[in-house]
Image (tube, grey):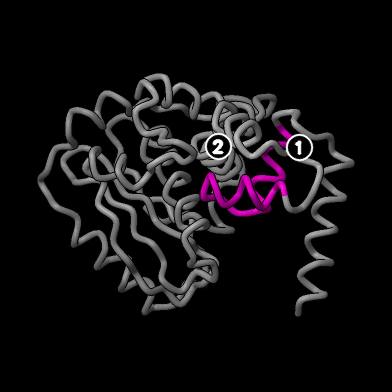
Amino acid sequence: MFGSVAPDIDQSDVARLIDIIASIPHPQEENESLRRLVRDEPIRSALERPWDRGYALAQDLHEALNGEYCNDNTVDVQRLFSDLGIHVTPVELNDTTIRAIALAGDGCGPMVAMNSRYKYQHSHPVRFTLAHELCHILHDRTHGIRLALASGPWAPVDVEKRANAFAAMFLMPPELIRRVIDNEQISLDTVESIWTVSKHLGVSFSAVVEHVCNLGFINEETRDDLKQQAVQSSADKG
C-alpha cells in the first residue's frame, strides 16, 4: 500500500504508518458529498500532460461545488475538508521529504495525515498540501482498491505533478486572481505584486509566480526575472 515511500524507510516510520492505518475509522462509509465527487482518473498515456489535466480536474471541482468555497479572495479548503468528512491528523515521520499521506477507500473514513516534520509548516504550504492531497483522494484511486499514497519524492512523478497542478488551480482560480488585480490595481510584473496575490489567495510566492505564468498573465521571461529578484531580495535581507 505504501510503494510511494523510500525503500530504505526506517522502522519507526513503518510503525507510525501502521498506526495511521489502524486509526482510520472502520467500517465507515464516505459521506454522500464526497462520494459524488470521487472520480478515478488514471493517467492513461505518456502523451497526456499531467499539469493540464490537474488544472482541468480542479476547474471541474469548482463547477461541481458551484463556487461555494470561494470567499472574497481565498478558497476555503479547510471548510471543504470538514464538509466532505475528510479527517486531518498530524503524524511525525523521520522522513522529512514526505509532506502528507492520503488514505481513503471503501469502508474506511478518508484521512490526510500531515507530516509535522516536513520543512514547510506555515499556513500557505499547508493549504497547498491539503489541496494536493484532495486530488489524490478524489482522483487517484482505482475502484475497489484503497488509496494509501505518501506525497514525496518516491511517489509517481506524473501523479504528483497532476496533484500539484490541481492544488494550484483549485486555490488560485483565474477569477480570484483577476479580482485581486482589479481590487489592488496591480500588474503582475513586480515582486511586490506577486506577494500581494500570495497574501490574498493564501498560497506561496513560488506557487503564484509559476501559476500566473502557466495561465498567461505573465511570460516565462518575466517569471524567471521575478524568481531571481525574489531570491536576491531574500539574500539581501539575510
Side (left or right) of 163 relative to 35: right
Q: Residue at x 76, y 80 (%)?
A: 238
Which is the main secondary structure of the residues drawn in magenta? helix
Q: Residue at x 14, y 37 (%)?
A: 29
The residue where tag 2 is placed is 172
Q: Residue at x 23, y 39 (%)?
A: 83
Residue 233 picture quarter: bottom right
Residue 43 picture quarter: top right
Residue 96, x across and y down, in percent: 51, 72
Q: Pick whichever of labels 1 and 2 is earlier in the sequence.
A: 2
The residue where tag 1 is placed is 187
Q: Residue at x 45, y 36 (%)?
A: 72
Residue 87, x across and y down, in percent: 25, 52
Q: Is residue 86 magenta?
A: no
Side (left or right) of 174 relative to 221: left
Callout 1, which amino acid? Ser
Judged from this view, the residue extending furthest toward the left is: 27
User: Relative to 204, does residue 188 appear above or below in the rendering?
Assistant: above
User: Relative to 154, does residue 90 appear above or below in the rendering?
Assistant: below
Stretch in magenta: 193-214
Side (left or right) of 144 relative to 124: left
Marks counted in the figure total 2
Residue 50 visible in the shown view: no
Residue 106, x across and y down, in percent: 21, 37
